[in-house]
Amino acid sequence: MTTTGAHQDGAGMTARGYGWWERRRSIVLDVGLALVSALECGLEGVYFAQNAALPVSLGVIFGLLAGSVLVVRRRWPFAVVLVSIAVTPAEMGYLMAVVGLYSLAASEAPRRIIGSLAGMSLVGTLIVTFVRARQNVLDTGVDTHRWYVPVVAILMSAGMTAPPVLLGLYVGARRRLMESLRERADSLEQELSLLADRAEQRAEWARTEERTRIAREMHDVVAHRVSLMVVHAAALQAVALKDPAKAVKNAALVGDMGRQALTELREMLGVLRSGEQVAARRAGNLTSADAAREAVPLAAVGLAAAAAAAAAAEDGPGMADIEALVGESRDTGMVVELSVRGESRAYPPEVEQTAYRVVQEALTNVLKHAAGAKVMVRLAHREAEVAMQVENGPSDSGAHDAGLPSGGNGLVGMRERVTALGGVFVSGETDAGGFRVSAVLPDRGAA
């Protein structure tokens, strides 16, 4: 039963595999090498027992036990190397020595331990090979040069030690590199997933901001115009029979205001449509054909919101239209005074529009909740900012609420507009029983 996870089943298999093996083929390989090594050492144990005048069975058992140590080469490679060094004088365990050195070099063991054990194995093999080669020369009686035995010993010992160590170091370094690349790929995948989540959050935030901005614009346009139309309609109803000329004038004003409201609504909707089209084109140009299918829905929302907001700010009303706005309120019968201080100058479009909307919403609130009250509109151009204030006194004794519906979001919308540009907004009742709305906008609020 092969399982994954952190648990361990009845067979002793962990989340990493079978014991210290990760795959079944690793078990097969190590067991196979251990059997071959045990067979080799068992055969070499026969010659060892004969040379040492020991029972052959004892030499075979010793060789089988020594060779089978190779089965733990992945878990304890240093133990395999130490056993191979120990049996080197008995001239057995050549396969165990080669495989053990390779496994040790490929493991995570410190380099000093690898070097020390490899040096011990090299010295042991060199001594045994030197003695065996010298004895063979003496036994055969062949006349050789002095360098023959040392060269043979050095070549054989180096041939059995250096290749497995170098190969093991290479395989270990390659394995660590692959693990590092795999971890880096996993980390990049997690980062990409996190970036995608953040992009989705930013897109949702952009959609929410755009919905809020549209609602605010709709409120400012519709509430003010419709409130004036309601007041003029009430006046028209009151004077229709008594003063036909005034009734005709009020009817014309109602029609003009209705047309103005429709015009502003069409302009705002047109800006939104054009902003979405520009955003889609920009997103399509910024990404490749495959990535565009995923990036356009997110990028289009943010670009549409930015494009629509910028276009609406540039094409919307500004502080130059405040005087006309005050005139419209006067036409309804409100007593409105306008005071302008300082030298007028050009401001960023968003500052112009925000100042206009604050005055517009304040006058609309006076029309709704303090009909008949005297209103004072103050506009001050300062060195690095522009300030506006709309203050109304208490309503006349005979005046009551105009009965117009209110969503309760007028002051909230004004505060959001002003604070978004880094300004200050204050509103509240006055000591005289009226209401005051004040706002200060920095000259470079957009920055």
Image (tube, rainbow, N blue to C red):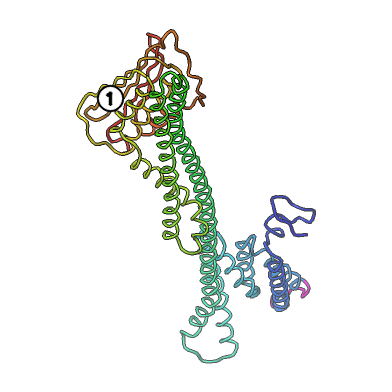
User: Could you tell me residue 376's position as x and y percent?
Assistant: 32, 18
Q: Secondary structure at mark 1?
A: strand
**Residue at horizontal 45 percent and vertical 26 percent from the top:** 227
Query: Which residues fall within the magenta stretch?
Result: 50-57
User: Could you tell me residue 360's position as x and y percent?
Assistant: 38, 28
Queried whether the magenta region covers residue 294, the answer comes back as no
In the image, 220 versus 122, the foreground residue is 220
Residue under pointer 1: 379
Q: Is residue 236 left or right of residue 4?
A: left
Q: Quadrant of the N terminus?
A: bottom right
In the image, 128 versus 381, the foreground residue is 381
**Residue at horizontal 33 percent and vertical 19 percent from the top:** 336
- Residue 368 occupies which quadrant of the picture? top left
In the figure, 381 relative to 137: above or below? above
Whether residue 112 can be seen here: no
In the image, 71 versus 444, the foreground residue is 444
In the figure, 256 relative to 288: above or below? above
User: Could you tell me residue 164's position as x and y percent?
Assistant: 55, 72
In the rendered image, the residue lying farthest to the bottom is 142
Queried whether the magenta region covers residue 51, the answer comes back as yes
Q: Is residue 366 left or right of residue 109?
A: left
- Residue 249 occupies which quadrant of the picture? top left
Badge 1 amino acid: Leu
Whether residue 282 can be seen here: yes
In the figure, 248 relative to 83: above or below? above
In the figure, 301 relative to 170: above or below? above
